[in-house]
Image (cartoon, coloured by chain):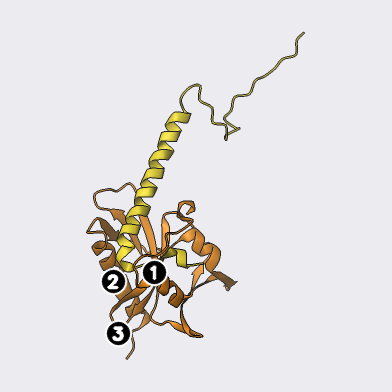
Chain colours: A orange, B yellow
Amino acid sequence: MTVTSTQQGVITEAEFVKIVILTSDGRLVPARPLADDERRDFEIHIRRHFLESLAVQLKTSKTLRPHGRSLMLQINFRVAAPLVTDKRLRYFLAHFDVKAMRYTDPVFLVPSAFFHRHAKHGVGRGKIQMQFKAAWSRVRETCGHSGRCPRPRWEAGF
Amino acid sequence: MWSQWALPQAQVGSRILEILEDLTGSAALDQHATDLISLPGVLWLGRTDLSPTVQRRRAA
């Protein structure tokens, strides 16, 4: 029996909450919007500081696709127009290893402006098709094992 | 293209903290800039709509 997409959503969101709290030493508070109609899974703020929050939309895959000798992380999904782009909205994209019961390094935290610009794959029946396709093996070689990913070059612009 | 946004999951919390602190800082700067610009005698050269114009009258 395989994990359904609904179960996958619940599991990966719980795992994301665990990571955010533990890797911030409890400083970050992820909260779920009650009405999930704005395509954001979490609103995250710094504990006891309510001025700013970061919205995060999760997109995960249980599989890595072979591509020659390497592996690709490919995530496809469709969203209804219009796309909401905001500097306070990021996409968290990751491979979830069902056997290991955790995400596999590296994961991706992409600003919505950059994501919408580069992942737009087509439009059909009133929906915008998005495709995230990363050379996962190569990125993993760069930063997955060492724990030192290159810093985003354009972080300030997003 | 996407590799610049990759990070180990152990760094997710610290990266989000950095992003939030940057957002808080820029919001504070925006407010500071607004306060400064609203001072009398201060011109914001990028906002031509707010720059005073000099009405010249032809000499009679």
- Judge whether A23 appears above or below A73 on screen: above
Q: Which residue is mark 3?
A: A99
**Residue that lies at the very extreme toward the top in this rendered image:** B60
The kind of secondary structure element at disc 3 is: loop
Q: Are marks 3 and 1 in contact (CB under 8 Å)?
A: no
The kind of secondary structure element at disc 2 is: helix
Q: Which residue is mark 2?
A: A15
Coordinates of residue A64 in the picture (x, y in percent)? 42, 81
The kind of secondary structure element at disc 1 is: helix
Q: In front: A106, or B58?
A: A106
Q: Quadrant of the C terminus of chain B?
A: top right
Q: Which one is closest to the eye, mark 3 or mark 2?
A: 3
Q: Are marks 3 and 2 in contact (CB under 8 Å)?
A: no
Coordinates of residue A80 in the picture (x, y in percent)? 51, 67
Circle 2: residue type? Glu
- Judge whether B56 appears above or below B44 on screen: above
How far is disc 1 from disc 2 in space, using C-alphas?
Answer: 21 Å
Q: In the displayed structure, does residue B6 sit left or right of residue A30?
A: right
How far is disc 3 from disc 1 in space, using C-alphas?
Answer: 22 Å
Residue A89, image quadrant: bottom left
Circle 1: residue type? Cys
Coordinates of residue B50 in the picture (x, y in percent)? 57, 30
Crowding around mark 3 (Cα neighbors within 10 Å: few <14, some 14 to 19, many 20+) is: few
Q: In the displayed structure, does residue A8 sit left or right of residue B54?
A: left
Q: In front: B31, or A80?
A: B31
Circle 3: residue type? Lys
Q: Chain of mark 2?
A: A
Q: Which one is closest to the eye, mark 1 or mark 2?
A: 1
Coordinates of residue B38 in the picture (x, y in percent)? 47, 28
Q: Which one is closest to the eye, mark 3 or mark 1?
A: 1
Q: Which residue is mark 1?
A: A143
